[in-house]
Image (tube, rainbow, N blue to C red):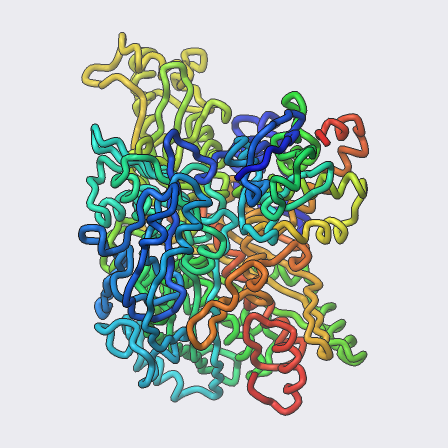
Amino acid sequence: MTRDISLTVNGTEHELSVEPRALLISVLRDELDYTGPNVGCESSMCGACTVHLDGEAVKSCTVLAVQADGCDVTTVEGLATDGEFHPIQQGFQEEHGLQCGYCTPGMMMTATELLDRNPDPSEEEIREALEGNLCRCTGYQNIVRAVENAAEKMQQEPAVADGGGD
Amino acid sequence: MGAESESGSGVQSVDPDDVDAADILGSAIERREDPALLTGDAEYTDDIELPGMVHMTIKRSRHAHARIENIDTSEAEAMDGVIEVFTAADIEAPGNLPTGWLLDSLEQVDHPILAEDRVRYQGDALAVVVAEERYIAHDATDRIDVDYDRLGAVTEPSEALADDAPAVHDDASGNVAFDWDIGDAEKTDAAFDDADHVVDLDLENQLLIPNAMEPRAAVAEYNPSNDELAVHMTSQNPHLHRLLMSGVIDHPEHKLQVRAPDVGGGFGSKIHHYADEALVALAAKRHERPVKWTATRTETYLTDAQGRGHDTHAEMALSDDGDILGFRVDTAANLGAYLSTFAPAVPTYLYGTLLSGQYDIPAIYCSVTGAFTNVPPVDAYRGAGRPEASFVVERMIHRAAKEVGMDPAEFRRRNFVEEFPYQTQVAVEYDSGDYEKTLDRALDLLDYDELRERQEAARAEGKYVGVGLSAYIEACGLAPSELAGELGAQAGLWESGLVRFHPSGKVTAYCGTSGHGQGHDTTYAQIVANELGVDYEDVEVVEGDTDEIPQGMGTYGSRSAAVGGSALVKSSQKLVEKAKRIAAHQLEAAPEDIEFENGDFHVAGAPDRSMHIAEIATQAYLAHDMPDDMEPGLEATSFYDPDNFVFPFGLHAAVVEVDPDTGEIDIERYVAVDDVGNQINPKIVEGQIHGGVAQGIGQALYEGAEYDDNGQLVTGSMQDYTVPKAEHIPSMETDSTCTPSPVNPLGVKGVGEAGTIAAPQAVVNAVCDALDVDQIGMPMKAERVWRAANAATDGGEH
């Protein structure tokens, strides 16, 4: 038994049939080949699978694909525009905000949602916003710097920030 | 290279395009790995999708210790989409996972890849499901019915060694895996006889779960027409996995490829050879279809090799003047249910040999008993033995300073090793160091005297501020191979590097290490570009594939820069020597008259008679005009086997405020001054320190594998085992000094594990200092701290 759904992922519409129990992350990775978001815990604790669902950061390992029927999904693959990095990607690159990179796609999706809500967050606000995204490599310090770096860029160049895809 | 940083404010990275070629080594350039990782283009093992691929899951024991009476797979096998279910009984001679380090007294026990009649930890593999789809494989696994006859379980090393403990292995009497010692027992006893003061502590270094963000995974594909088997897997050492796996599954090594695609962190947990990847390889051969297995997070909690797990009694002999006279350490080490790949080395040669710390201690004796228990195999986790040693040393130093009434900074200074090389009483010889320098730099950053005054003033106001110091030492790049062999290693500890010029003048460097987040593509290219005098962008780095890199030993033990980087230097130097002879020939000069600078060979005194090394590469492949007896081509391979370990060091300090009413700890400041020798890329060094410290703070405050009386893991999810979050980790102030190592041509020491080694005792010492207590166990959760704070007045045990 499957259900027909439609998902718009990074601007591309997909029609597909899924099992009712299929998770959004499984459908994105296994059916549609968006392997940027990663699976780290299957329990919404680690945040490696974070994507935007209609602009809101969600853990796609605990969303059923059928719940996302008709929604706009943005994954890490949708951050860059015409080959130009989103400011958050630039921030992570410049501040060494990643090491193994496994948490990074989810970390950036949570960070961009934060910056949409709060364009100039304090260090404390950044750390609080990232509480659902675990990183085992960086000790978070350069992730915080990366988000600050991106915030600064986005305030200077709001036009670039709008290219983020949501 | 190697300039010392000037403040604790952090390193600024730079775009490689903005760096002069001559300055590339030592520059904090941005990483070339990052674009793929930032766009989702990276390829982790679970991202691999092959035509006709099927999925594998593993049925695991729900009990920690039991006899297996029956495994009923019939219901699972009957499910649509299930291809096969197999148990140990269904495969011919299920392989045994080997131990790669032997000790004289080691009790070797079988470790079958599928349990036959007995399971020894919760998570031991019992059966394998192969199915068309991942979800079906998991459903089928749930439908396998196992009858267990439960046995008593034991999870703590000290309890396992007690007389009435359940026997984990029938052949290992008293659950003893080995008895090992190092140092001079008689000399140490004599030092204690002469002591004015003796202090002692019982110290537990709790079991930790590595928690790499990427769960372990493997994809295997088999080609029956040529018997070639490829395994793409989460590996820190593909060549080692190839060698071990070829024996376990009885497949010829030269027809087995192991490739590590992008790997999402390891911290030791992806060094070891587990049953899982061997089972994936077997399944691919049985069905002649590609097979994928990816651990769930629950499986990583149950089966990733854990770290630490020491129960230690330590005693220190002191003079009235504050000299350390002797140090005696007795440790029971948890090895878990079986001997993992390097397990016997971790609580012995990687632990006992580091017990002199940064101090000139005239007599040391350490004895270690390895204990089998009903927890997953325990092996290397970031630091591997060295954090345990540094924890014991620095907790005892803190205690000893208090005993003799000295400030802990001055007590350390008084006992520091000052002359190098320094031969310790526990076998190793320190290469170089300047311990006062890192201490002084840290004390300056802390404004230590002012801090002590503030501490006193705060206490008068009822606030509990504490300062904890940790003067750590690390040993990286375990070597040479001959010594490792004498100590029990079943592998060499060299590293191999191939540097190849292409006819166009571009370069590929191949190294047998296998990075998984450390940025080797960047740092190795910096090394090779510097040696050859070519543009950084003209050097490609290849790692992690046994089909591409001739040989290798992998990435662990902070060895990659010191051993792998040095292998690339040696290969580059060989290559330059050959190029010099070609240049001499074509410039019609004697080789000894040719000078090499920034990629140009020129005749001494005639700088316009010159050829660039890239031009020579073209000539070497054209081979139209070569010196007599010289073969065409321009590439060189080295097997670099260092003469000694290298010994990074540093001083980490934590300033905490403890609330005695709630037991909450606030880390106000964390200062890290590290000396890792020359730095290839200071931004990457800083990142390694940050991450290491975070794991060390995690151990001090939050982390620990906890088991109930039946051996069930209580902390079996990210909900229950606290991997530190962004809010849990303070902003760190990092700084460095530079004392190059004389051991290797780069003068580097290694940095991957330094933070994890240094941090736990800095935080514990700070909390003990704040509350003026001798001992608090890790992790220092609120209840424990509250109890310590409230028992402090009556001197109770905590």
Q: Which residue is painted at 39% across and 79% down in the image?
A: B158
Whole-percent x, y for residue B426 in the image: 35, 68
Above or below B117: residue A111 = above
Whole-percent x, y for residue A27 in the image: 55, 37
Above or below B509: residue A26 = below
Whole-percent x, y for residue A73 in the image: 66, 34
Residue A19 left/right relative to B285: right
Above or below B793: residue B525 = above
Q: Which residue is painted at 30% across and 10% down in the image?
A: B622
Q: Is residue B735 visible?
A: no
Q: Is residue B96 visible?
A: yes
Residue B40 image-quadrant placement: top right
How many numbered circles are shown?
0
Residue B554 image-quadrant placement: top left
| The C terminus of chain B sits in image quarter | bottom right
Residue A111 left/right relative to A99: right
Residue B494 image-quadrant placement: top left
Whole-percent x, y for residue B348 in the image: 34, 66
Above or below B228: residue B91 = below
Identify which residue, B305 or B682, lies in the foreground.
Answer: B305
Q: Which residue is painted at 32% across and 74% down in the image?
A: B369
Residue B415 left/right relative to A48: left
Q: Which residue is painted at 44% across and 58% down in the image?
A: B381
Identify which residue, B465 or B612, lies in the foreground.
Answer: B465
Residue lying at the far front in this picture: please name it.
Answer: A1
